[in-house]
Amino acid sequence: MQTEFRAGRRRPLAMALFVALLAPGVALAGTAKEQELETRVAQLEAQVQALLAAQQQAQAQIADTKTQLDAVDARHPAPPAGKQPIQSTAINASANPNTTFSYGGFIKLDAMATDTSDGRIADGSAGRLFYLPSQIPVGDANADGGDPYTDVHAQFSRFWFSADTVTDGGDKLKAYIEADMYGGGSNALAGNETSTNTYALTLRQAYVSWNDWLAGQTWSNFQDVAALPDAVDFVGPTDGTIFVRQAQLRYSKGPWSFSAENPQTTVTSYLGASRFNSGDNVLPDFTGRWTAKGGWGHFSVAALLRQFKYGDETGSGAAVSVSGKFNLGANDDIRYMANAGSGIGRYMAFGLGTDAVLDADGELHALDGYGGFVAWRHAFNPKLRGNLYYSAALFDNDPSLIGYGATERAQSLHANLIFSPIPKLDVGAELTWGQRSLEDDREGDLKRIQTTVKYSF
């Protein structure tokens, strides 16, 4: 029994010794895990601090970049809404600030076969390059034009340059110059078809405009360029068209425009012995125009006042022109022009008639003339379009002054098709019939088929 008692006392003692021996190990184990956790926490804190520093550096770089972009935007403000210009700053160093420079034009190849009833149009003359009614040959009853003849050229290829400026005060300035190669060459090998087909540069337009004012050479204010039909020929309805480019001073405001233009008097001598130009004018030619525009098209009325002068002799004339374009829908439009006046000669049909006639005493008499055209344009689809137009001119001659060999009238009929396989590229063909009639009832006819390839840029 004593033995059992001693054994019972030993068990708690052994347990106490076991716990005493185990406690330091448990304590040591807990300390190692805590140290490992503390190490991991320290590493995570270091990584978080590095990420925060990188983010702050990136934000600083973004802010610096934005500041630089804002500075660039301030120096080069964004262009207005709409079609944006390719060029944002001036490339011509000598120009005014805020000037933009642009250029354009087209390359045009013309090929035509012509058949005239009463003789051949002289080789190298303007009538071989485009429809010019004054050069249709008119002969007697036995006249014969012979076989058809062909001409191929690229003289009407064109280019232009423009410098446009808007000042800080809102003033608009424009300088414009335009040229083509129609006008002949300057040496024996130029301007002919023998070897080089070289042709001289020809000034078409050169002017400067300031807000509502224009000074320089451009289309006459008496001409409505927007009414011209879509032609394969250089002009098309030449007979009844007002067609003049010349130096002038013009003022335009709203629908109104007024001009003082270069004067020149074309004269037929007594009984039509000769035709010549007189540079004796003192007063300019004065014009005025009113134009209304809308989604329906446009309508325009113009007036012309002129002085004629040859030597000590003077005269005067006046003319009116009504023109426009009327849209018949998305695919059709009508274009027209009607002209009438005393002394309208050099303004209509490339000078088919003269401005004035001299009598036997050397006095000037204004020549009355009338003309016009009407054209229908139809778009078959976005790539194919066609035009049909008729044009005519008539002069009220006095045969006792001008003779019976003067042109009494001219007329022409045209039909064309123009195909645009890609934008700005036109491939077209046009049939033309023209006729010129004299006061003695003689007539000469012209038949022509003309093709063209034209690329605008």
Image (cartoon, grey):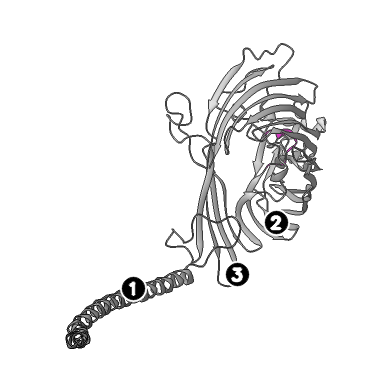
Q: Which mark is residue 259?
A: 2
The residue wearing badge 3 is 170
Question: Alpha-carbon distance for marks 1 and 3?
Answer: 53 Å
Q: Residue at x 29, y 77 (%)?
A: 41
Disc 1 versus disc 2: nearer the observer: 1
Q: Name the chief secondary structure element in magenta.
A: loop
Q: Position of residue 353 (x, y in %)?
A: 73, 35
Q: Nearer the viewer, mark 2 or mark 3?
A: 3
Give, as a single range, the part of the protein colored magenta: 236-243
According to the picture, the residue beneath numbered tag 1 turns out to be 51
Q: Secondary structure at mark 1?
A: helix
In the image, residue 321 sits, relative to residue 126, either above or below, namely below
Amino acid type, residue under disc 3 in the picture:
Gly
Pointer 3 local density, CA inside 10 Å: few below 14, some 14–19, many at least 20: few
Q: In the image, is residue 260 above or below residue 433? A: below
Secondary structure at badge 2 equals strand
Q: Position of residue 448 (x, y in %)?
A: 66, 22
Left or right: where 41 falls relative to 201: left
x, y (%) of residue 84? 55, 56
